[in-house]
Each structure stands twice: as structure tokens, then as C-alpha cells.
Image (spheres, helix red, strand yellow):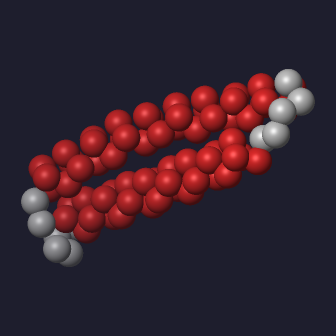
Amino acid sequence: MDRDVELRHLSEADVRIAEAEGVVSKQIKMVEKLRCDGQDTSVAEETLKAFQETLQTMRDHRHEIVKTIEQIDQGLI
């Protein structure tokens, strides 16, 4: 394993996670707006759930990258 490659992956993951957090935030606002306007929110809520699940997957992947870097630093891999 190459530490520099993993650090690049970590940096890329951080950027993608920040972008995804922005998308989730916007979708939450959309759900709230639809609800306040008395409109059906079911599709918007399903979309929000999908976005949140994707964000969690991205966070899990980031955690694995961090673990790999730690293992490299400890000389385990």
C-alpha cells in the first residue's frame, strides 16, 4: 500500500462528502418547503433517504481509508 495514494483518496473522499452533505442539506430544505406548502413529500423524502444512505456509505469508505493509513503508519501493511 502506498501512503501517498491513500492520502489522496482521503482528500478526495473529504471533498465528495462535503458535496454530499450539501446535497442532503438542500434536500432537507426541499422536504420542509413542500411540507409547509401542504404538498406531498413522499418522493422528496424517499430521495432524501437515498441521499443520506449514500452519504453514510461515503463516510464508511472514508473510515476504511483512515484505517488503511493508520495500518500503513504502524507498519502492519
Q: Which residue is drawn at 70% across and 46% down?
A: 43
- Residue 67: image location, x then y, percent: 34, 64
Q: Which residue is drawn at 62% across and 47% down?
A: 47
Image side of residue 32 versus residue 52, left or right: right
- Residue 1: image location, x then y, percent: 12, 66
Q: Residue at x 12, y 50 (%)?
A: 4
Is residue 52 in view from this perspective?
no
Asked if residue 58 is positioned above or below residue 34 in the image, the reply reads below
Image side of residue 12 versus residue 48, left or right: left
Asked if residue 49 is positioned above or below residue 36 in the image, the reply reads below
Asked if residue 71 is positioned above or below residue 28 in the image, the reply reads below
Query: How many numbered marks are there?
Result: 0
Q: Which one is nearer the viewer's eye here, 51 or 40?
A: 40
Is residue 5 in view from this perspective?
yes
- Snapshot quadrant of residue 76: bottom left
- Residue 56: image location, x then y, percent: 52, 55
- Snapshot quadrant of residue 38: top right
Image side of residue 68 versus residue 32, left or right: left
- Snapshot quadrant of residue 73: bottom left
Asked if residue 62 is positioned above or below residue 30 in the image, the reply reads below
Q: Which one is nearer the viewer's eye here, 49 or 7?
A: 49
